[in-house]
Amino acid sequence: MTTTKERIVEATTALFMQQGYSASGLKQISEASTAPVGSLYHHFPGGKAELAAETLRRSGRAYGELVGAILDSEPDLVRAIDVAFTAAGETLRASGYADACPIATVALEVASSDEDLRVVCDEIFRGWLEMLTRRFEAGGVGRPAAADLATSFVACLEGGFLLSRVAQDTAPMAALGRSMVALVEAAVR
Amino acid sequence: MTTTKERIVEATTALFMQQGYSASGLKQISEASTAPVGSLYHHFPGGKAELAAETLRRSGRAYGELVGAILDSEPDLVRAIDVAFTAAGETLRASGYADACPIATVALEVASSDEDLRVVCDEIFRGWLEMLTRRFEAGGVGRPAAADLATSFVACLEGGFLLSRVAQDTAPMAALGRSMVALVEAAVR
DNA sequence: GTCTATAGCTTGATAGAC
DNA sequence: GTCTATCAAGCTATAGAC
């Protein structure tokens, strides 16, 4: 049983991934979620801003958990990195290069023009970076280096989404997986 | 002497950097460039799509040349990388985290929904990657590794723009500079 | 080439029946 | 909670005077 509110958030997540915040109109969200505009304002009285904030927070948490689960699936840290980037590339390819990061496009759109949403995105990225830093520390990397690796992981993944989506080719994501593996290998030995 | 057409393209470049394609209305572009809407359609009969394509091509070429010039300013390749990332962070900070990549936000917005503009962005990134690959080859790195380094350079720079803009902090860009330096050091020795 | 006015459509948001 | 009708404001695009 998916509730109306869940359908709205899921449809908004998909539209934010594919075309970002400004291009995703409430009418389009209403149609994609098979929920009338009135229901949309019933569940999100704050309108588009509230819907966007809640969608970003939910999809940001879910995506962080997904990445964590993939990293957990492989005990060796270096191989886990390889698996994560391969999975990201495969998900992209299988979805026609649509299924990517649910935050990045919106984050770039709002960073200089919507302070509330910028803060929401900032908190999401902070959460991802903390989770990744802890994992690299658990793998034997010292504090400052682990934080740098976490930042590089997110940047390579986001850069991979950008380059692979635009080129409609998994090659950039694969190359970034190799670079990220090299960075982690250098840090753990 | 700046022509009307140049002012339009420059204003559009700035707006694309800060808020992307969909949020940048022709009225806003007209006001920012102090050019009436009619002039806009005189210089770009194809409307917003043509203006966007030409703006992306021009700003993409200019940004590639800027990065190339910064890399040329330092003979040692590893130090050149450091200089480039430091400069990117400093430009961000000095502009209130607004002056970033003129392509990335639009590229993510249109990758799945506007095939014409997607191809324009693809050609721009291809040009950057070729330019960077040649530079890494000139620095003594073999073909396949040089192409991977070029991809990592673009991804780290774009990821740095994303994370530093959202956090309003140069620290992510600085961390990515360190990672990129480590990757190039490992490749040249 | 420059500029104003406006058409036609879509947007975010609201009111009110059910 | 669900849904429809509608508003004011925004958008892209065009027409036509200068």
Image (cartoon, coloured by chain):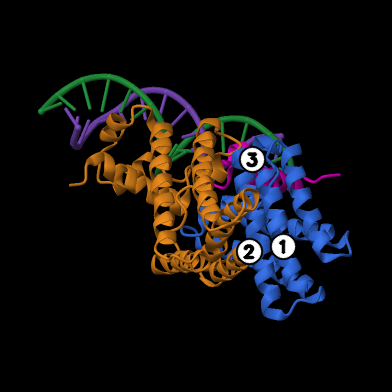
Chain colours: A blue, B orange, C purple, D green
Q: Where is A162 relative to A135, above or below?
A: above
Q: Amino acid type of disc 3?
A: Ile
- Note whether residue A46 is visible: no
Q: Amino acid type of disc 1?
A: Ala
Q: Where is B28 relative to A146, above or below?
A: above
Q: Position of residue A188 (x, y in %)?
A: 77, 73
Mark 3 Cα shell of 10 Å, populated few (<14), some (14-19), many (≥20) = many
Viewer-proximal residue among B87 and A11 = B87
Judging from the image, mark 1 belongs to the subunit labelled A
Q: Position of residue A157 (x, y in %)?
A: 67, 55
Direction from residue A77 to residue D2 in the image, left or right: left
Location of mark 2 (residue): B183
Direction from residue A46 to residue B94 in the image, left or right: left
Viewer-proximal residue among B149 and B135 = B135
Judging from the image, mark 2 belongs to the subunit labelled B
The residues tagged by marks 3 and 1 sit, at their Cα atoms, a distance apart of 42 Å
Residue A16 shown in magenta = yes
Q: Which mark is residue A182?
A: 1
Mark 1 vs 2: CB contact within 8 A: yes
- Which element carries disc 3, helix, strand or loop? helix
Judging from the image, mark 3 belongs to the subunit labelled A
Main secondary structure along the magenta-highlighted residues: helix
Residue A47 shown in magenta = no
Q: Which residues are magenta?
A: A1-28
Position of the C terminus of chain B by quadrant: bottom right
Direction from residue B57 to residue B113 in the image, left or right: right
Query: Going 76% across and 37% down the picture, which residue do you hit?
Result: A94
